[in-house]
Image (spheres, helix red, strand yellow):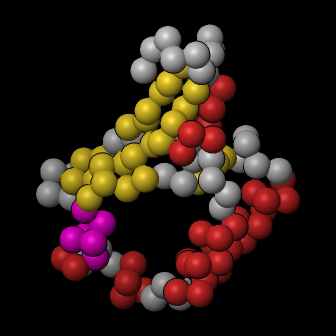
Amino acid sequence: RLAARGCLLAAIPPGEQGAPVTNVTLSAEDYAQILGLAADLEATVTEDEVALTGQALAQLDGDWRLVFADASEITRLIRLPLGFRLGQVFQPIRVRRAYFENQAAVRHRFGLAR
């Protein structure tokens, strides 16, 4: 599983200003490769691991930085108007509160706003 995870992470190039790369910013070939490697990694997960036990939930709780996304709520941010650029995107997950959200850093290319 570590090898599959390493292959997946190695296939994801760094995004501009730390932004996640998306199906919008990647070539069709790179996007297909990443999806295939993600499927390979998912295939290593057992039924018991899918069950959200206390230990699994404890590992999920925290702040996660997105490095890849193909969800529309993220891909729409790639093309911001008026010189604004997407930076890092974090997903704070609070298991006890049943809460998560996307938090995106947005910067202006000339530094006019942050």
Q: Nearer the viewer, residue 97 or 11?
A: 11
As displayed, is residue 54 above or below residue 32? below
Horizontally, residue 85 falls left or right of residue 59, namely: right
Where does the C terminus fall, quadrant-wise? top left
User: Count the marks: how many?
Assistant: 0
Horizontally, residue 76 falls left or right of residue 24, namely: left
| 60 within the magenta span | yes
Could you say which quadrant of the image residue 77 lies in? top right
Where is residue 17 shown, x and y percent of the image?
56, 39
- At x 15%, y 51%, the residue is 97
As displayed, is residue 42 above or below residue 70? below
The answer to whether one can see residue 70 in this image is no
Where is residue 36 shown, x and y percent of the image?
72, 71
Where is residue 40 shown, x and y percent of the image?
65, 80
Horizontally, residue 62 falls left or right of residue 8, namely: left
- For this orientation, the residue located farthest to the front is 110
- For this orientation, the residue located farthest to the left is 96
- At x 85%, y 59%, the residue is 29
Where is residue 92 shown, x and y percent of the image?
30, 49
- At x 25%, y 62%, the residue is 61
**Which residue range is magenta in the image?**
56-61
| 54 within the magenta span | no
- At x 48%, y 27%, the residue is 106
Magenta-highlighted stretch: main secondary structure? helix
The answer to whether one can see residue 24 in this image is yes
